[in-house]
């Protein structure tokens, strides 16, 4: 299979190169506590992890339902890790560094994204 690079995308003023067809995006969701759920938008935190299939390296993250500094922290904590190593260390680092009422929802969404990876692997996809 031939791979081709995709054009860069503009995301919040920052240009980030898109990976090739050798990456997969894994998504996890978690509900915010009802007291934090905004009335006019989603009460769910969503986390996307883009990982390279061959190495299992997390290349980038995206998050919805978390403030900008929390989004930046998530990318800092997860980018470069191997998704096959499991979420425990990353989730613990998030717990230590992201102190707010929505912390549990963010950690759960991260763990659920990793679970999506494990489901993907169980389908017989090559391991990282």
Image (cartoon, helix red, strand yellow):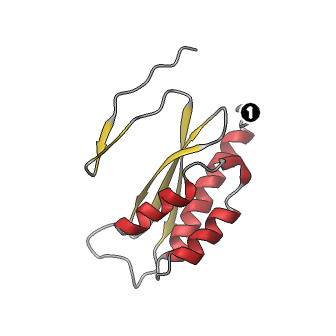
Q: Position of residue 78 (x, y in %)?
A: 56, 56
Find the residue positioned furthest to the top: 2
Which element carries disc 1, helix, strand or loop? loop
Residue at horizontal 54 percent and vertical 14 percent from the top = 2
Instruction: Say whether residue 126 is left or right of residue 47.
Output: right
Q: Give the residue at mark 1.
A: 124
Residue at horizontal 58 percent and vertical 48 percent from the top = 80
Q: Quadrant of the C terminus?
A: top right
Residue at horizontal 47 percent and vertical 77 percent from the top = 102
Looking at the picture, does residue 55 appear above or below residue 92?
A: above
Instruction: Say whether residue 43 is left or right of residue 80.
Output: left
Q: Position of residue 113 (x, y in %)?
A: 58, 54
Q: Position of residue 108 (x, y in %)?
A: 58, 67
Residue at horizontal 66 percent and vertical 47 percent from the top = 82
Q: Quadrant of the N terminus?
A: top right
Foreground of the two, 116 or 67: 67
Looking at the picture, does residue 67 appear above or below residue 28?
A: below
């Amino acid at each position: 299979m031939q791979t081709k690079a995709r054009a860069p995308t503009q995301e919040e003023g920052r240009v980030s190169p898109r990976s090739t067809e050798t990456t997969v995006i894994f998504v996890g969701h978690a509900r915010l506590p009802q007291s934090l759920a905004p009335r006019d938008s989603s009460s769910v935190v969503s986390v996307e992890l883009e990982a390279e299939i061959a190495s299992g390296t997390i290349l980038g993250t995206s998050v919805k339902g978390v403030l900008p500094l929390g989004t930046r922290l998530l990318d800092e904590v997860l980018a470069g890790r191997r998704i096959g190593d499991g979420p425990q260390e990353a989730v613990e680092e998030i717990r230590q560094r992201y102190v707010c009422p929505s912390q549990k929802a963010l950690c759960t969404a991260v763990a659920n994204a990793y679970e999506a990876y494990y489901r993907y692997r169980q389908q017989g996809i090559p391991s990282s």
